[in-house]
């Protein structure tokens, strides 16, 4: 697993402590939802995105390393994924997210396949 996947890229404009809740999330080909929650925790920084009506009722967990750019003025987070990649991502599991290292590995494997370095 790449630890850098679970940390913000230095060039994305992230500032620790900034609340990203409510920011719109933009894939490379359009909007995918809004940030419901986020974590700046070292080694497991991520965004929980509510996809709203686009993928009815689905939440997706995006590792912070997928964030390309944060635009605080427009309150948008741009990620290096397509809408299809987000749509096909592993289902978010609230219980396993915090308790199961295998779940973390499953997410890592999926997103590392699309990681742009």
Image (cartoon, rainbow, N blue to C red):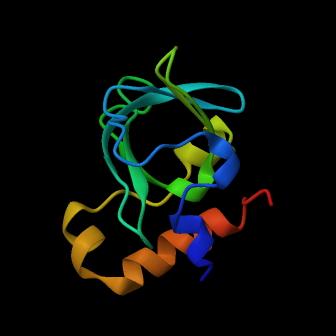
The quarter of the rendered structure image containing the C terminus is bottom right
Looking at the image, the residue that sits furthest to the right is: 117
Residue 71 position in % (x across, y down): 56, 25
Q: In this view, does 84 lie above or below 42?
A: above
2 or 49: which is nearer to us? 2
Question: In terms of image quadrants, where is residue 20?
Answer: top left
The total of numbered circles placed on residues is: 0
Answer with left or right where residue 54 lies relative to residue 13: left
105 or 85: which is nearer to us? 105
23 or 29: which is nearer to us? 23
The residue located at (63%, 48%) in the rendering is 85
Looking at the image, the residue that sits furthest to the top is: 74
Answer with left or right where residue 11 lies relative to residue 61: right
Looking at the image, the residue that sits furthest to the left is: 95
The quarter of the rendered structure image containing the N terminus is bottom right
The residue located at (78%, 56%) in the rendering is 116
Residue 97 position in % (x across, y down): 29, 69
Residue 101 position in % (x across, y down): 36, 85
The residue located at (49%, 76%) in the rendering is 106
Residue 10 position in % (x across, y down): 65, 53
The residue located at (55%, 72%) in the rendering is 108
Question: In terms of image quadrants, where is residue 28?
Answer: top right
Q: Is residue 64 above or below residue 2?
A: above
Answer with left or right where residue 10 lies relative to residue 108: right
């Amino acid at each position: 697993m790449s630890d850098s996947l679970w940390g913000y890229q230095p060039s994305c404009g992230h500032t620790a402590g900034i609340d990203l809740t409510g920011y719109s999330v933009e894939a490379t080909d359009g909007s995918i939802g809004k940030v419901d929650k986020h974590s700046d925790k070292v080694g497991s920084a991520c965004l929980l995105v509510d996809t709203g009506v686009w993928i009815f009722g689905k939440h997706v967990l995006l590792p912070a390393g997928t964030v390309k750019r944060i635009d605080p003025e427009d309150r948008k987070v741009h990620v290096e994924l397509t809408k299809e990649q987000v749509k096909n991502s592993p289902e978010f599991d609230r219980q396993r997210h915090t308790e199961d290292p295998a779940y973390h590995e499953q997410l890592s494997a999926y997103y590392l396949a699309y990681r742009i370095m």
